[in-house]
Image (cartoon, helix red, strand yellow):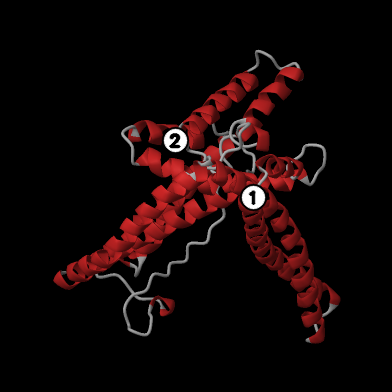
Amino acid sequence: MPKIATTTLLALQDELPKIASLASWGAAASGVIHGAAGKKALGLAGALGGHGAAVGAGLGGLYKGYKSYSDARDQGADVGSALAHGVGGAIGGASQGALLGGIAGAGVGGALGHFHPDAAAVEKLRGALSTDKHWSGAVGRFGQRQMHGLTGWTPEKGLESIRGGSWAAEKNVKDLVAGGKGGTPELAKARKVVGVERDMQARGLTHVPGIIKALSGKDRVGTLKAMAAHQWGAASPAQKAMVASMTALPLLPLLSASGRDSANAGEQTGGALGGTAGAIVGSALPFYAQNKAMQAGTYVGGKLGKGVDWVRGKHRSLPDERDQSGMDGQNYPGERIPMSAGSNGVMQ
């Protein structure tokens, strides 16, 4: 126990300068993001990042798919098996290509938006890349929603202009009214969802900086209630069942003595519960930011569970957890897919 405590204190001491630096960087970044120059650069970065991700996904999928198919055929696989390899390669290539293309597009857009002297021209270009008049505008809006989720940047005309925030929920209400479903329970539920979405948006819970600010503010209880209402209160029965199962399944092994006594049980359970908590906290975030919130929750939960395993004497180091010095590393398998797209059920 003394050895564990000493190691933990030394690790915390090493991390304090990083935490202080991160806080200073965050304060400076907030000023940049919400300043005129930041808004001009980030808006175009998001729009071009979305287009870059779409192009990168297409090219990466084609290249990796064809290469995987060709490699399989060269190794003697039949056409069916080679096609299966090709599909798998295409999926992986599209994912990698989308990430690289999105980063490249955002970099070009951010630089162009920052250095271009005419703010009106930059805004006009951003609008053209996000237009409703052409299908390609959807990828520009998608990229801007991701930018909003990560940085808190918001277009001058509001999140609804890029189909974020409460846009989908409000459109659902309009469609129900137009379809003659006024006064029905379905419409009442849809209006409830609109209220929940607007509350999340007003609290700043549609982007990561806003979540951090809300959870560190005075109204933490109200913030947690709003998150619970968004993930649970306005969810469909299917979504509620998914949340309940994702919460309950990691606890099942703990019901048996063998499960409780197994190596790394705390780390595995903590990681799973942390990922679920991350999904609930980030339920109103756009796709990419929500995925990162889940990964962060998985990491933190896994580390807390790992500490419990150490105290219980049930921790067993994994092969990839050790570096050359023999000290425990920072790796934890936390890649997960977002559990839901929020109470409106729409991928953002």
Direction top: furthest residue: 183
Residue highlighted by disc 2: 228
Disc 2 is placed on an element classified as helix
Taking the spot 68% from the left edge, 44% from the top edge, the residue there is 118
Residue position marked by numbered label 1 in the rendering: 113
- Crowding at dot 1, Cα within 10 Å, few <14 / some 14-19 / many 20+, comes out as many
Residue toward you, 222 or 73: 222
Point out the tag, 1 or 2, that comes first from the N-terminus: 1
**Count of residue discs:** 2
Pinpoint residue 155: horizontal percent, then vertical percent: 61, 37
Q: What element carries label 1?
A: helix
Label 1–label 2 contact, CB within 8 A:
no
Residue sitting at x 34%, y 32%? 219
Q: Residue visible at 24% across and 70% down?
A: 313
Q: In which quadrant is the N terminus drawn? A: bottom left
Is residue 260 visible to us here? Answer: no
Q: Nearer the viewer, mark 1 or mark 2?
A: 1
Residue at 47% in and 36% down: 204
Residue 73 appears in view: yes
Q: In this view, does 189 lie to the left or right of 208?
A: right
Q: Quadrant of residue 220?
A: top left
Q: Where is residue 34 in the image (x, y as percent from the top left)?
A: 50, 41
Q: Which amino acid does label 1 sit on?
A: Gly
Q: How far apart are marks 1 and 2 (CA)?
A: 38 Å
Q: In this view, does 78 lie above or below 285?
A: below
The percent coordinates of residue 27 (x first, y second) are 39, 48
